Image (cartoon, rainbow, N blue to C red):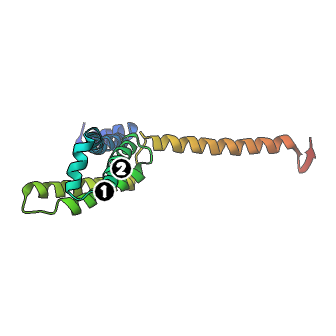
Amino acid sequence: MTLTERIARLHALATKYHAGDVTLLAGRLLLSLIFLHEGATLATHFDAAAKAMAALGVGLPLFVATIALQLGAGLSIASGLLTRLGAIGLGLFCLATAMLFHTNFASQNELLHFEKDLAISGGMFVLAAVGAGRFSLDRLVALYLHKRQRDKEMAAALLAVENHMWVGEVKLPI
């Protein structure tokens, strides 16, 4: 088998098994993991985390909103439900975090966190652009709504047939 034939065979397998959608699922799960973990950690160590955030100038309402965003949008991305919205929210959150809290570039650790937040933000914006993919609740909802619309159209057509009988060009009431 030549190299070209092998590449064609791999492409056919990838198309058959929707490798792009499997990759999107893996990417969504990996992207959401850091936010689910961090949100759960902040929630379970609420008092200590709130005190640490207050020292950075983050008030309690914003701290609670941060936990809600990390857990809510993290679950959104992991499950693939309202994925684009969750990805945009977390992408903006990462940009804000980078710009507000990781600006001491003299520190290698701060620079690393700044770059990490920018990279995660970029990944979130890509996810927002392409959507959740085939293996997501977004797709199941879309399929359900499409089927429901199709069922309504079919019911309307059947109702029209029940109310009228067409014989050639003449409409006869039933």
Work out whether residue 165 or residue 44 is closer to the camera in this orientation and state it: 44
Q: How many C-alpha atoms fall within 10 Å of the one at disc 2: few (<14), some, or many (≥20)?
A: many
Image quarter of residue 147:
top right
Q: Write down the residue under mark 1.
A: 93
Q: Which structural element holds mark 1?
A: helix
Residues at discs 2 and 1 in contact (Cβ within 8 Å): yes
Dot 1 alpha-carbon crowd within 10 angstroms: few under 14, some 14 to 19, many 20 or more: some
What residue is disc 2 on? 69
* Quarter residue 71 falls in: top left
Residue located at (41% from left, 43% from top): 80
Where's residue 111, x and y in %? Answer: 12, 58
Q: In this figure, what is the number of numbered marks?
A: 2
Between the residue at mark 2 and the residue at mark 1, the CA separation in whole angstroms equals 9 Å
Point out residue 105 in the picture as x, y percentages from the top left corner: 10, 63
Disc 2 secondary structure class: helix
The tag earlier along the polypeptide, 2 or 1, is 2
